[in-house]
Image (cartoon, rainbow, N blue to C red):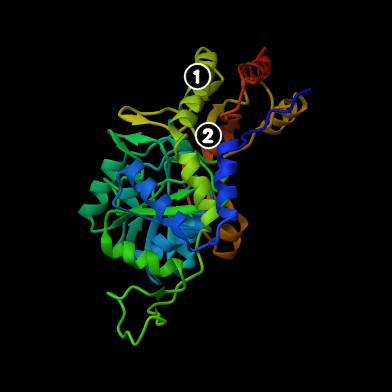
Amino acid sequence: MKYIPLTIHTIDSGDIKQVSDVLKSSRLTQGPKIKEFEQALCKYTEAKYAVAVSNGTAALHAACLAAGIGKGDEVIVPSISFVASANCVLYCGAKPVFCDIKADSANIDPRDIEKKITNRTKAIIPVHFSGNPVDSQQIYNIAKKNKLLVIEDAAHALGAVYRGAKIGSCRYSDMATLSLHPTKSITTGEGGVILTNDRILYQRLLLFRSHGITKDAQLLKNNPGPWYYEMQTLGFNYRMTDFQASLGISQLKKIDRFILKRKNIAKIYDKAFEDTSWIKPLKIENNRKSSYHLYVVRIDFRKIKKTRKQVMEYLLRNGIETQVHYIPIYEQPYYKNELRYRVNCSKAKQYYQQALSLPIFVKMTQKEIVCVVRSLLKLGE
């Protein structure tokens, strides 16, 4: 029996050669490949500036720091996301305020955002869940009306499109963050990026990435000689390596092909489940193109008289890996018990009870797709 993973990265001989060339070079880190990768991402997304960092969580943390988020501030975050989308707020000493989702897409609900804004709110962090863009324009309008910053968590969404603009263009945000984990649209192994069109934010991000240190002659307060550098703020070592960046450059050239393959898999799933009353795929709304990072269905387990655990165990016995994205962040023990969060996000709660992520990856074969579909539909017979 062949095993079908939930996802797997796609690395070819061209990627390996690019990494190998850097490993044979004189610069493994803080070299020219970082800038080349950042420029390639700017060209792809049409953002003015990009700052590559060590991972997606570091990208979120650096973005929050650059935004000036600190003690006493509140930041609105979605209830359904990976924990990093809220943890980055805690890292800055601020309070994440959890927002409910839209039932059909599992994306953050702009109507609930408006309800959660207080005089302490500093920013909104919307997540393009599963690669499906949020209603960015509406959220941006809410933010600007209330003088708030928008930091897009686009970890799932490199290659997605909203109203003709690539996610990451920052047309409707102050910053956007990417993850380059092996499960994402492209990978650098581990890695992240912050995109922005604001030069001041860009300069802050560069400082935070590398210990708060600059060697830029235009920014130095003193300049006694060529050896000189200044630590101008408290930063972190969030640097990406050059061999990671070289992999990113190679991968980015193939992103459109990768996303097209994921889209075609999703279309097959959609067609297979369209007449099934107990399976409901998440909706992609008008004027949006998903990157199909995840393929999530909502299952009415009562109709098939099985629990989610039983369904997942059955599929695994048939060689099919599934997962749940995600447990509501506020239900995690750290938030629930240590921070004593008590949140009422009814749609997020209902979503969590029904959600199941099915395999989707670039190398997935027609035979594997059919196996997943038939195995799942068999449960309803």
Image x and y of residue 257, in percent: 46, 28
What residue sits 53% from the left and 34% below the top?
294
Q: Is residue 253 visible?
A: yes
Task: Count residues near mark 1 (Cα–Cα under 10 Å), then give few for <14, some for 14-19, many for 20+.
Answer: some
Amino acid type of the residue that numbered disc 2 sits on in the rendered structure: Leu
Image x and y of residue 305, in percent: 68, 22
| Above or below for 304 versus 137 | above
| Above or below for 226 versus 57 | below
Q: What label sits on residue 270 in the rendered view?
A: 1
Q: Quadrant of residue 17?
A: top right
Residue corresponding to mark 2:
294
Image x and y of residue 199, in percent: 27, 61
Amino acid type of the residue that numbered disc 1 sits on in the rendered structure: Asp
Farthest residue to the left: give it: 145
Callout 2: helix, strand or loop?
loop
Proximity of marks 2 and 1: CB atoms separated by less than 8 Å = no
Q: Please state which of residues 214 and 21 is positioned toward the viewer in this rendering.
A: 21
The CA distance from mark 2 to mark 1 is: 13 Å
| Above or below for 271 versus 66 | above
Image x and y of residue 169, in percent: 31, 45
